[in-house]
Image (tube, grey):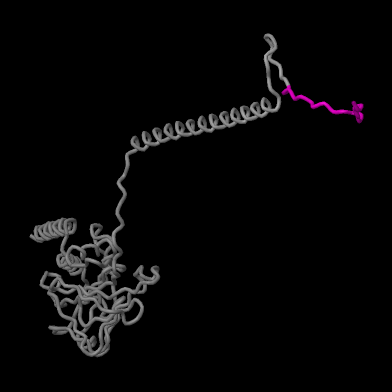
Amino acid sequence: MGSLSSLTWIILSLASLLSMKAEAEGIRSAHLLDLLIRDYTVKSFDRHLRTGIVHNVHLPANLSGIKVDIARFRCGSLHRYGAQVKEFHLGSGVTVQPCAERVMVIRQNLGYNWSSIYYANYDLSGYQLVSPVLGLLAYNVGSDVSSGSSFELEILAREKPIKIDFSNITKASDMTGTRPLCASFEGDGKVKLRNQVSPNVCFAARHGHFGLVIESLPPVPLRKKISKWKLVVGSSVGAVLGAFLLGLLLVAMFVKVKKKARMEELVRRAYEEEALQVSMVGHIRAPTASVTRTPPRIEHDYTPYPS
């Protein structure tokens, strides 16, 4: 009888794990992702964990990229002293509602891949995340918490706000000239944007999911990809056309030089023929000088005899 109950428990556990794996592979909702992380966390919860100590939760491979840490607190101690859970600093005066005795606080770091779910669930048009989405959630811790009866609790910071430090996980520090805004992802599907209280530090008044965003740059139009054969044909045609044009240019320059030389030769010949005329003597062409008659000159004075 004992072996039968053990076998039944193993079958149910395997069925539950397979069901959660299928859900993780097709998850598209931020709320369903929270429930899936809660179920894995509750199943691995050890009631003997020391109170106030942060413990890491090992998630299955299909949720790789998500980091989860849990800590168990007494509600009264949490209210009196506050707590530090990774990037979240809960100051004194924080309250958990409703809380009978103990509370399990879950801190989520969804990484950049899983944080993209929030683009589909929230209106982030005009903005882009520059940090992973961080989550701070609380669930009841009872004697039968592993049986699936856990439910979400509220964390309210009325006296001192919850401080969230993104310094070690954001890539905004690599960007110059930009000042990120604090984004709070509300349960009603809206996003609230606030200024940082200091570089990479935000304040919150309650539990939820948070991140840093900046205004996104306008998209750069993508150039249409050209196939290789079109590129080869285009290059070949361009090369042939270039060679043809270069040949025409060389021919034109050669003709121009020849024409200039011919003109210079004609001018030279015209000048020579003008200075020294050419005449035909028989069948021979010979240069002749122009005929100039020399006027007579009396070399001695002549005085005629008187008649």
Tell me what residue is drawn at x 32 percent, y 39 percent. 227
Magenta-highlighted residues: 289-307
Left or right: residue 202 compared with residue 288: left
Left or right: residue 288 compared with residue 4: right
State the image coordinates of residue 296 (x, y, percent, origin top left).
Answer: 82, 26
Magenta includes 155? no
Q: Residue furthest top?
A: 282
Observer-nearest of 268 and 21: 268
Quadrant where the N terminus sits is bottom left
Q: Is residue 271 above or below residue 192?
A: above
State the image coordinates of residue 135 (x, y, percent, origin top left).
Answer: 23, 72
Q: Residue furthest front?
A: 307
Q: Is residue 62 above or below residue 162?
A: above
State the image coordinates of residue 270 (x, y, percent, origin top left).
Answer: 64, 27
Observer-nearest of 44 and 29: 29
Prevalent SS, magenta region: loop
Left or right: residue 136 compared with residue 280: left
State the image coordinates of residue 248 (x, y, percent, origin top left).
Answer: 47, 31
